[in-house]
Amino acid sequence: MSVEVERLFRTYHDTLVRYLTRRLGDRDWAEEVAQETFVRALRQERIVNERAWLFAVATNLVRDDARKDARRRKHLELLRAESEQEAAQEPETQTLERAQEMALARAALESLAEKDRLALLMKEEGLDYHEIAEALDLSVGSVGTTLSRARRRLAEGFEALVRARQGEQGHAAS
């Protein structure tokens, strides 16, 4: 390890956590961001200005988290608006069936391994293979295999959930 992370930690941890706690208003979250900052320091061959580098990385991590949260909120608002618009346009039974189908699709997606789920979601958001590879720490060549496997498992999981639901409805009708 080129950078002496243990020394960096002893020297800057308390100051960095205080800064992040003031910025975020949450000490636990500040500790998590500080920890990620020091993990990133492990990957550095050389850091010229340690204090500035650590604070810049921590600030960028907080900014990135805020952007992700804003995107998630916007995405959820769009989904809610689409759902409300579709509900207004569909008869009630179709709306219920569609909602049940969407719930099964979400459950199938959530049942995937995290890397598979993230790869699918990133691809759906328009990221290319290089971006997905970098984000998930994969080789570019394995992204296609990961996506193919994830799609197959998603389809299989969805179909299994549909069959299970149909079985439950069959038993309820008897």
Image (cartoon, rainbow, N blue to C red):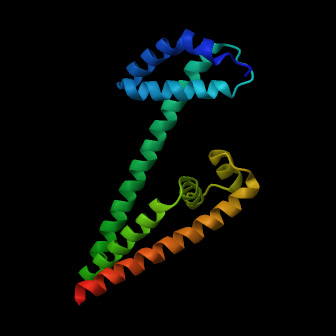
Q: Is residue 133 left or right of residue 64?
A: right
Quarter of the picture holding the C terminus: bottom left
The image shows residue 145, relative to residue 168, as above or below, that is above
Task: Give the residue drawn at x 56%, y 15%.
Answer: 9
Asked if residue 2 shows in the view, the reply is yes
Q: Is residue 99 left or right of residue 47?
A: left
Q: Is residue 167 left or right of residue 93?
A: right
Q: Nearer the viewer, residue 169 or 50?
A: 169
Task: Give the residue drawn at x 60%, y 28%.
Answer: 39
Furthest-top residue in view? 11
The image shows residue 117, relative to residue 94, as above or below, that is above
Task: Give the residue drawn at x 24%, y 80%.
Answer: 92
Asked if residue 59 shows in the view, the reply is no
Task: Give the residue drawn at x 47%, y 63%.
Answer: 109
Furthest-bottom residue in view? 174
Give coordinates of residue 170: x percent, y percent.
30, 87
Q: Nearer the viewer, residue 141 or 83?
A: 141
Give coordinates of residue 117: x percent, y percent.
53, 58
The image shows residue 84, relative to residue 90, as above or below, that is above
Quarter of the picture holding the N terminus: top right
Give coordinates of residue 77: x percent, y percent.
36, 55
Give coordinates of residue 132: x percent, y percent.
65, 52
